[in-house]
Image (spheres, grey):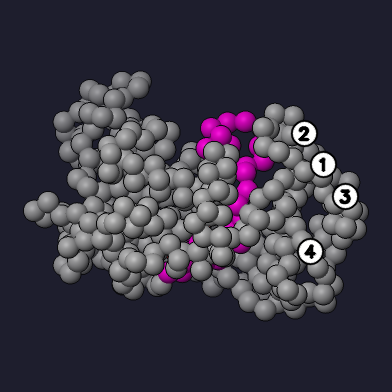
């Protein structure tokens, strides 16, 4: 019997496992394909804030950015690298956004050095940009390091049942608590209010004679050089989905697009592609992450109809699955958000600390229930 089982060994599941390992809990992690095999394995894994004007998503990502930069450096320095980030506006609208960001931010900003400017294209140099200290995670090694001390099983979980006070997973493993960290893949619960969108991404590692010491983000993300290699990636393909698309993903076309977009920003010489990574990132319909317990929709509809219909339902009155939570929907900021959200989830599970209504999955239940009545 485990204290906690986590389904999904991406950055969200592994961050949760790490939190519980720190509390000396017996932790089981299951993944159908391996550690960091989903969106997390494809990610460039840049740790950066959101460069927008304002809003709750910007605020939570900024808190998580500050938290994660310290966290990765403190606990996993060998798989984390600090690097100055240069974010360049794509168009005039984004230039305006960056100007407002720079005016309002409390994050310490930096100047882009002349040595970097010499490598940028003329059009990139003419655009508004913002630079600050940020970081990059080695996605695979980070996830593996986080679950050291947990039992890892490679298995596609098909069935979860709550019985006699614990969760039984595929009739084989028992755990007191269960956390679903399954990313953009099919959810294990038949609850229609949990809808996540998968956005396909592609990253290439390239060999190049150009040395680049910065993280550069404009149309795509470009990593700093590691020896003579650097990574170029983006998640913006909303048309392809591995589970629903008829045609296979066109890797050649994806490569061409990434290189063409990178070339609008930086002059790279002698480029040779050495590796491709592809995967889905999952986002929620209001772009905020989903963290916390899950509402039993049928039972709650039956018991609490009146509370659901009011303008601001009392989430505490809803009925929840026992000892079960989810962590998901972090969009393009999974590596920024995961450590921060995992701590929130741990404090909720172990100390009953309340989770903000802006990230709790119950917000989607309330909206879904209103729509169907
Ligand atoms: C190309 C690309 C670039 C990105 N760049 C960045 C970036 O620079 N910075 C950043 O912060 N984020 C980035 N992201 C987003 C980030 O990768 C995601 O937000 C993050 O990976 C989400 O992590 P996750 O753990 O929720 O999901 P995933 O990593 O997808 O993990 C879910 C896991 O669950 C497993 N699973 C699902 N169902 C089952 C089942 N039934 N049984 C067993 N296992 C199951 C899957 O195999 C998978 O390994 C990028 C994403 C992509 C694709």
Residue placed under numbered mark 1 in the picture: 128
Residue 12 vs residue 162, the one in the foreground? 12
Give neighbour class at mark 1: few <14, some 14-19, many 20+ (Cα, 10 Å): some
What percent of the width, then of the height, locates residue 182?
Answer: 38, 58
Q: Are marks 4 and 3 in contact (CB under 8 Å)?
A: no
Q: Is tag 2's residue or tag 4's residue first in the polypeptide sequence?
A: 2
Residue labelled 2 has its Cβ within 8 Å of some atom of ligand 1: no
Describe the element under mark 2 as helix, strand or loop.
helix
Residue placed under numbered mark 4 in the picture: 212
- Asked if the magenta segment contains residue 115, the reply would be no
Write the residue at 45% across / 66% down: 145
Residue placed under numbered mark 3 in the picture: 125
Q: Nearer the viewer, mark 2 or mark 4?
A: 4
Q: Is residue 91 above or below residue 303?
A: below
Q: Which mark is residue 138?
A: none
C-alpha distance separating marks 1 and 3 = 8 Å
C-alpha distance separating marks 2 and 1 = 8 Å
Q: Are marks 2 and 1 in contact (CB under 8 Å)?
A: yes
């Amino acid at each position: 019997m485990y204290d906690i089982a986590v389904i999904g060994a991406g950055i969200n599941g592994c961050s949760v496992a790490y939190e519980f390992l720190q509390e000396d809990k017996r932790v089981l992690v299951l993944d159908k394909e391996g550690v960091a095999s989903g969106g997390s394995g494809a990610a460039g894994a840049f740790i950066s804030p959101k460069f927008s004007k304002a809003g709750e998503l910007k605020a939570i990502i900024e808190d998580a950015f500050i938290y994660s930069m310290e966290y990765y450096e403190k606990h996993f320095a060998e798989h984390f690298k600090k690097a100055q980030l240069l974010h360049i506006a794509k168009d005039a609208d984004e230039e305006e956004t960056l100007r407002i960001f720079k005016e309002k931010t409390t994050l310490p900003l930096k100047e882009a050095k002349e040595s970097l400017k010499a490598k940028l294209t003329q059009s990139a140099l003419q655009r508004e940009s913002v630079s600050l200290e940020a970081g990059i995670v080695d996605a695979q090694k980070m996830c593996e390091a986080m679950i050291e001390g947990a039992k890892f099983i490679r298995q596609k979980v098909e069935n979860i049942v709550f019985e006699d006070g614990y969760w039984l997973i595929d009739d084989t493993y028992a755990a007191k608590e269960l956390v679903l960290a399954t990313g953009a893949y099919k959810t294990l619960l038949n609850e229609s209010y949990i809808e996540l969108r998968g956005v396909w991404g592609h990253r290439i590692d390239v060999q190049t004679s150009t040395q680049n010491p910065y993280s550069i983000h404009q149309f795509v993300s470009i990593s700093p050089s590691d020896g003579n290699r650097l990574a170029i990636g983006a998640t913006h393909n909303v048309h392809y989905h591995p589970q629903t698309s008829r045609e296979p993903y066109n890797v050649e076309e994806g490569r061409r697009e990434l290189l063409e977009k990178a070339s609008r920003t930086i002059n790279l010489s002698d480029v040779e592609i050495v590796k491709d990574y592809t995967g889905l990132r999952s986002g929620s319909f209001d772009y905020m992450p989903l963290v916390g317990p899950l509402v039993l929709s049928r039972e709650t509809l039956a018991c609490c109809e009146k509370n659901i219909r009011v303008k601001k339902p009392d989430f505490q009155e809803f009925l929840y699955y026992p000892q079960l939570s989810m962590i998901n929907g972090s969009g393009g900021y999974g590596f920024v958000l995961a450590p921060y959200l995992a701590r929130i989830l741990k404090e909720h599970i172990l100390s009953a600390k309340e989770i903000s209504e802006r990230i709790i999955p119950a917000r989607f239940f309330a909206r879904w229930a209103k729509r169907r009545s």
